[in-house]
Image (cartoon, rainbow, N blue to C red):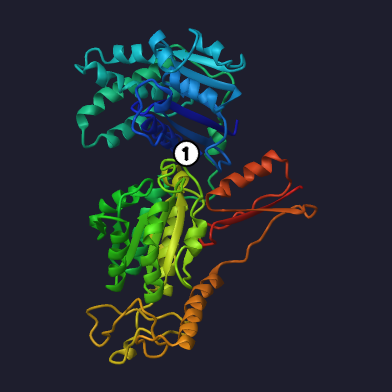
Amino acid sequence: MKNVVVRFCGDSGDGMQLTGNMFSSLSAILGSEISTLPDFPAEIRAPQGTLGGVSGFQVNLGQGVYTPGDKADVIVAMNAAALKVCVMNKLFHEHAVVIVDTDTFTKNDLEKAQYTTDNPFTELHIPETVQIVPVALTTLTKEALKDSGLDNKSVLKSRNMFALGVVCWLFDRPIDKAIHFLEQKFAKKPQLVPNNVKVLTDGFNYGQNLALSINQIRLDDNDAAHSVSEKGNYTSIAGNKATAWGLIAAAQKCGKQLFLGSYPITPATDIMHELAARKDMGVVVVQAEDEIAGVCTALGAAFAGDLACTSTSGPGLSLKSEAVGLAVMAELPLVVIDVQRGGPSTGLPTKTEQTDLLQALYGRNGECPAVVLAASTSANCFAFAYEACKIALENMTPVILLTDTYLANGAALWRIPKLEELPEIKPQSVPEELKGHFNPALRDERGVRYWAFPGMEGFEHRNIGLERDAEKGTISTNPDNHEKMVLARQAKVAQVADRIPELKVQCNAASDTLLVGWGSTEGHLPVVHWRTSITSTPCRRTRKKCCGGINALLSAN
């Protein structure tokens, strides 16, 4: 097979996210393209072994990978509840391989998972074509750590490492690289490393000694190793981290201090975490008391001359809308990152949904134009965050960058760029010749207002939320002037589109239906194309240019 979909699932405390991330990173090292999807409940952790507490992590790896995949080729089920959830939600196909922990199918386990018989495989009507690989994960983990001195609860938490070892054997993943990841993961708790390494190694050796094999699946990594299109250093990166790094790169490129004013909200909080850890790069992070305070501190930083950003998700974008309107009126550069989630209200905070497009475009009072971008992969969140900063600083406008939970928590293979490779950023700094007679209404030939900030002698000015005179920059309530300013702000935003290349649709000339997607649907459009046997292909836009994340493909009717 050219690509394989693997899903790890178990209780919320079974470490499925760590296991999946490590396996994904090992696959990326071999040159496989990857796309991942962490899947966990939003509720308070349900009782162990119940259906409500099942957490999962899915990865698609190989060649031509655009999504985390649909139905899994391989399932690793840590307990009876996880197996039942996978069957109920049809998460694997009829020729899949299912690896189960045989120690977690006791009578008590089956009752908690709401089985009605003592034979779960028959009760679930699992097809005979599904290959079951039974492994006594709990017993084997206890045996591996019998001399460790750990209590039973701590020992059971290591089952995921035994499972990872088995899967590494089955898929020929390098065990030494997995050990290196463990050492990095627990660098601040080195006492945890030896036991986890032992369990991981024992799992790998168990598969080797028993000659465990998956009869139905073989992934050819030799082809995958040559699938990357450009030479360079690659890593596995999640969308939130890529976004944070894109902001840092933009600040370094333009010589501005990066300021983030935000309030924690799922699933955007990791951006704040990543930036808060980068004081060595001059990043300043303020965790505000609420969403409104977060964006207002960022707006103050923009007035003071910083590269100012704020991060949030759907409900938070609603709260920030008034301050975004102030940024439009004051014509200050501001980057707003909206990691979309299911809504409305609290909605589905751990599930992905493209919920905020209309809110981002139109969710402000008055004539209030702003630039809206949408990243389309976890990896290009870096490029889009960088581009958002570039547009904001060069055009003195707020820019809203839309990602979503799928991109934020998922991971993809990413080529690490060098700073000198990135496009130049030229902030709209006020020219020296305006010293002494500057006012905030002055514009360049593109209609973009000049940027002066406190501490610049001779450029003192007021910047307000009230409408200002188009010539003097003072307060004005004249209707003709208001119309002139509305048109000026609109024209300034509209001219940003001049830098975007025209869309080119590759298609079958006989096709008569156009399917258009945006943002994270980019990877799923080829799936639609494949399923419907369409001969056309999606328009693959360059990652080096901001194109709003729009992709198109033509399909047969």
Identify the secondary structure beneath mark 1: strand
Provide residue 72's location: percent of width, then percent of height. Answer: 54, 29
Residue 41 at x, y percent in the picture = 41, 34
* Amino acid bearing label 1: Thr
Residue 422 location, x and y as percent?
43, 63
Tag 1 residue: 36
In this orientation, which residue lies closer to the viewer: 441 or 292? Answer: 292
* Residue drawn at x 51%, y 80% as measured from the top left: 487
Residue 293 appears left or right of 555 = left
Neighbor class of circle 1 (other Cα within 10 Å; few <14, some 14-19, many 20+) is many
Q: Residue at x 50, y 83 (%)?
A: 483
Left or right of 362? Residue 41 is: left
Q: Nearer the viewer, residue 362 or 383?
A: 362
Image quadrant in which you'd find residue 106? top left
Q: Position of residue 33 (x, y in %)?
A: 51, 41
Q: Which residue is located at x 29 percent, y 36 percent?
A: 185
Q: Is 511 left or right of 344, judged from the image as shown?
A: right
Instruction: Work out whether residue 169 can be spotted.
Output: no
Q: Relative to residue 399, is residue 464 depicted above or below?
A: below
Task: Please tell me whether residue 343 is drawn above or below residue 398 in the rendered image.
Answer: above
Q: Quadrant of the N terminus?
A: top right
- Relative vertical location of residue 489 with respect to residue 2 in this rendering, above or below: below
Camera sees residue 65: yes
Residue furthest right in the image = 510
Residue 203 image-quadrant placement: top left
Quarter of the figure with residue 437 = bottom left
Q: How many marks?
A: 1
> Residue 542 or 224: which is nearer the viewer?
542
